Image (tube, grey):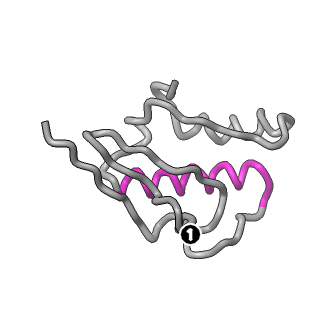
Amino acid sequence: MTNTIQEISTPNAPAPLPVFSQAIKANGFVFVSGNIGLIAGTWTLVEGGIQAQTEQTLQNIKAVLEAAGSSFEKILKLNIYLKDHGDFKAMNEVYITHFPGRKPG
């Protein structure tokens, strides 16, 4: 078995900080770095509150996954961190639209 490690980069998602990559692909797995609702090509947080930020974040993740040859359907685990637990319901209303079938662990 060959241990291939590939850095993934796409202009369709926000650039990472200099000490990270957008994702790493290794042995068939894709490890995506943390994301927030930044608009690609800028350091601007999308306007519109938690639902707009959730949608933008998921679009950023989708762009990175696609650059790696992957998709939401192949996600095994997804961690979400919320600053305000009061945003949980609104965030989930957007999140669930991206996972109509099997949900990540």
Q: Quadrant of residue 29?
A: top left
Above or below, 44 against 87 in this view is below
Q: Describe residue 33's horizontal placement relative to residue 71 as left or right.
A: right
Q: Describe residue 14's horizontal placement relative to residue 94 as left or right.
A: left
Q: Describe residue 66's horizontal placement relative to residue 54 as left or right.
A: left
Prevailing secondary structure class for the magenta stretch in the rendered image? helix
Indicate whether residue 54 is drawn in magenta: yes
Question: What residue range appears in magenta?
Answer: 48-67
Q: Which part of the image, by quadrant, shows the N terminus?
A: top left
Q: How far across and how far down the image is residue 2, in percent?
A: 15, 42
Q: Residue furthest left?
A: 1
Check disc 1 and give the amino acid type: Ala
Q: Residue furthest bottom?
A: 42
Residue at the image point whose x is 47% and y is 58% from the top: 22
Q: Describe residue 8's horizontal placement relative to residue 12 as left or right.
A: left
Above or below, 2 against 15 in this view is above
Q: How many marks?
A: 1
Q: How far across and how far down the image is residue 93, in percent?
A: 69, 37
Q: Which residue is mark 1?
A: 40
Above or below, 27 against 32 in this view is above
Q: How far across and how far down the image is residue 34, in percent?
A: 58, 50
Q: Residue furthest front?
A: 19
Indicate whether residue 102 is drawn in magenta: no
Q: How far across and how far down the image is residue 3, in percent?
A: 21, 43
Residue at the image point whose x is 50% and y is 59% from the top: 20
Check disc 1: other Cα within 10 Å, few if <14, some if 14-19, many if 20+: some
Q: Secondary structure at mark 1?
A: loop
